[in-house]
Image (spheres, rainbow, N blue to C red):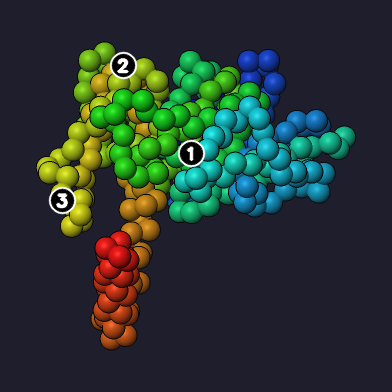
């Protein structure tokens, strides 16, 4: 039985590769989930660095650079990981590996063979994979679809015929779009979609609103056919809420903060004036 699109906690599944190899796995937990994958002798999985939670004694781990996973200069400049870890079972008996989500996230098993061998994901969505999965980062060549952030500029593409596990925050909704069906989604809430879905970016209101904050400024207009996975709580939205809750009280209780701001603007003024004087000289 092929892996489902997404899983519920504690439910065991069996993945069958195109070569009829059987790989049992189980997704454990509720919000910060762990996927436990059984490995037969000489089998291996590829995972992102820092994701290994536990493994049996027969498993060997190695941190390597995989040439088949395309990582270019943009990927490195935006602080993305350019290496992967390989977990291999060289022993004579079966072993297991536990791969954990790095945050409060759900783990979705994606059988790429079901999606025609390719799916587009949000940046850093990839967690680990079994069998033939290639991870690459694509740049949308259409100017109207470029967003001036790393998360909007980079998109992750998974291709091959293997089983990939990706991350999503909060609750996950799967939408099956018919031909010509249109769905508007906040760009940060898109976890993954098939390559057959047409994506256009729509700015809600003037761009100057972004300078003063605001929510749902950018919407993705998706046109079917295809499948879309939507998350209710993107990680950056969660991190923003935590940062506001932690930072705001400290700013009110710490008067030195405003003094530091005043010193910063004063020094910036001095630097600008000095550069103008030196330019005139």
Give me the C-alpha separation between circle 3 and circle 2: 33 Å
Q: Residues within 10 Å of mark 1 (few under 14, many from 20)?
A: some
Picture quarter with the C terminus: bottom left
**Residue 225, numbered circle:** 2
**Disc 2 or 1, which lies upstream in sequence?**
1
Q: Tell me the residue that label 3 is attached to.
A: 209
**Residue positioned 30% across, 61% down in the render:** 279
Q: Nearer the viewer, mark 3 or mark 2?
A: 3
**Residue positioned 68% across, 38% down in the render:** 65
**Residue 281, numbered circle:** none
* Nearer-the-camera pick, 18 or 238: 238
Label 2: which secondary element: loop
**Residue positioned 36% across, 17% down in the render:** 196
Q: Tell me the residue that label 1 is attached to.
A: 74
**Disc 3 or 2, which lies upstream in sequence?**
3
Give me the C-alpha separation between circle 3 and circle 1: 27 Å
Residue 224 percent across, percent down from the top left: 28, 18
**Residue positioned 57% across, 30% down in the render:** 70
């Amino acid at each position: 039985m092929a892996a489902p699109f997404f899983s519920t906690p504690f439910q065991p599944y069996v993945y069958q590769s195109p070569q009829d190899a059987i790989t049992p796995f189980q997704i454990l937990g509720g919000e910060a989930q762990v996927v436990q994958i059984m490995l037969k002798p000489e089998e291996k999985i590829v995972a992102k660095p820092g994701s290994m939670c536990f493994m049996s004694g027969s498993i060997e781990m190695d941190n390597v650079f995989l040439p088949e996973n395309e990582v270019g200069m943009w990927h490195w400049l935006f602080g993305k990981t350019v290496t992967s870890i390989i977990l291999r079972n060289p022993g004579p008996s079966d072993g297991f590996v536990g791969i954990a989500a790095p945050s409060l996230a759900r783990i979705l098993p994606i059988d790429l063979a079901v999606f025609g061998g390719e799916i587009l994901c949000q940046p850093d969505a990839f967690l680990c994979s079994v069998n033939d999965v290639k991870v690459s980062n694509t740049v949308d060549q259409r100017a109207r679809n470029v967003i001036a952030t790393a998360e909007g500029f980079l998109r992750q593409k998974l291709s091959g015929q293997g089983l990939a596990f990706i991350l999503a925050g909060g609750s996950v909704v799967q939408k099956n779009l018919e031909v010509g069906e249109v769905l508007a989604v906040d760009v940060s809430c898109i976890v993954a979609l098939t390559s057959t879905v047409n994506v256009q970016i729509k700015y809600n209101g003037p761009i100057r609103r972004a300078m003063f904050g605001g929510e749902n400024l950018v919407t993705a207009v998706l046109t079917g056919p295809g499948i879309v996975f939507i998350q209710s709580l993107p990680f950056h939205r969660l991190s923003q809420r935590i940062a506001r809750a932690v930072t705001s009280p400290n700013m009110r209780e710490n008067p030195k903060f405003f003094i530091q701001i005043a010193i910063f603007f004063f020094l910036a003024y001095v630097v600008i004036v000095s550069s103008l004087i030196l330019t005139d000289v």
